[in-house]
Amino acid sequence: MFSELLKRAEDQLSRRLPFVIYRKPNSKLVKVILQRDDQLHHALDYTEKGFVFAPFDSAAPVVLIPLEEVLNAQFTTRKIPTFEVEKKVHGNVREKKEHLELVKQGVQYIHKGYLDKVVLSRKITIDCEEPPLKIFEKLISTYTDAFCYLWYHPKIGMWLGATPEILLRTENNDLITMSLAGTQPCAPNKNPVWGQKELDEQLMVTNYITNVLKGQVTKIRVHGVESVRAGSLWHLRTKITAAYDNNLGKVLKALHPTPAVCGMPLSVSQDFIREYENYNREYYTGFLGELNLEAVIERNSNGKNRETKSYGTIKPKTELFVNLRCMQMVDGKTLIYVGGGITKDSIPEKEWEETIVKSKTILGILAKNQF
């Protein structure tokens, strides 16, 4: 039962032992992976099995929670009351001024030809005394179409999130990745209308991903651009499929970080972020998820051979998500991370408003201690 799953996670937390509890998009199955000691494990070559948690800095170690104990249970979505976010959360004049100046600086670098795009972010700090697992319950009820998680390691900290973006999915040497860019709030009974700025940004990310993958994979296919909904927001998304040959580490090194969370050119945008964002992103805009977990791949069968329907083959499957729409819990404070892609057409005031829109659902969840 789901309640028993929560009790095991609560016990793990009280004993200060690592665990992750999560639910995949559009699924009712909640999983928890429990580690028996507080040792800090790392993914060294991506042949390991477990749950990985990677920082934004691609040169930093990737944390691994190994498959020592895995439990799962079904969860029934509950109706969550919504609350207006207090104006003072977004009314900090100093924070707004700093973000507007940051965006202006980014636009200037783009017009000077140093950058094509840069992703700039900020963090919102609020007081929150609500139990983390109660917040997780709210996340999985509110973000039914996102990857929702609560991740904890006593030597790293606690993170929660609800991310709409897949970094990659592999199964039986087939690979799926996606480019995601553009954001606008959902309007009742209306499909999104995208401007040229969002369309250009989406194409830029798609082209970059296909180019960096060319030396690592084969049979690349770029699918059409589509509008996808994540909570109360619309995004532009393009699916990219390919075949790969057991070189997952090289593929991840080529993909992370993507322009959707960093910018182009990659090294210049990384340098800009380090110099001007004025804080360490840590695991925000990193990636997380299942690494080489075994899954049953059903064999093709037909009516003439019923026997083949009764079994399949066991294949390792990896499913990783970009760590967006996330928060970090530190000493009674909750840090909420939000950002957006800056291009030559970006207007600082509108970029500020986009960060507000992106933070509203999580802030609304934390606004009242009710369920």
Image (cartoon, rainbow, N blue to C red):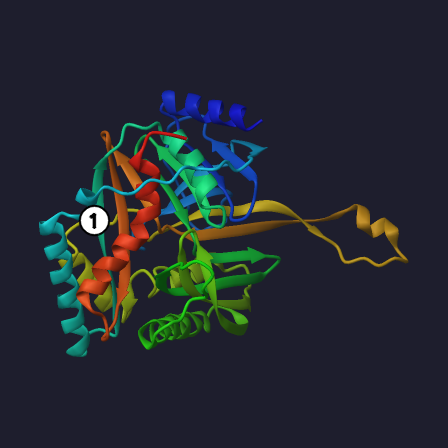
Amino acid identity at mark 1? Asn
Q: Position of residue 171 (x, y in %)?
A: 59, 56
Taking 338 as reference, is 37 left or right? right
Task: Identify the residue shown where x is 31% and y is 37%.
Answer: 366
Q: Secondary structure at mark 1?
A: loop
Q: Position of residue 73 (x, y in %)?
A: 58, 32
Task: Identify the residue shown where x is 30% and y is 32%.
Answer: 155
Taking 71 as reference, is 277 left or right? left
327, 157: nearer the viewer: 327
Residue 56 in sight: no
Q: Residue furthest front?
A: 189
Q: Position of residue 271 (x, y in %)?
A: 19, 63
Taking 304 as reference, is 86 left or right? left
Q: Is residue 260 above or below residue 283?
A: below
Q: Position of residue 337 (x, y in %)?
A: 27, 48
Q: Residue furthest right?
A: 304
Task: Locate the C terminus and report the quarter of the image it occupies.
Answer: top left
Residue that numbered label 1 is attached to:
280
Q: Is residue 69 above or below residue 27?
A: above
Taking 82 as reference, is 262 left or right? left
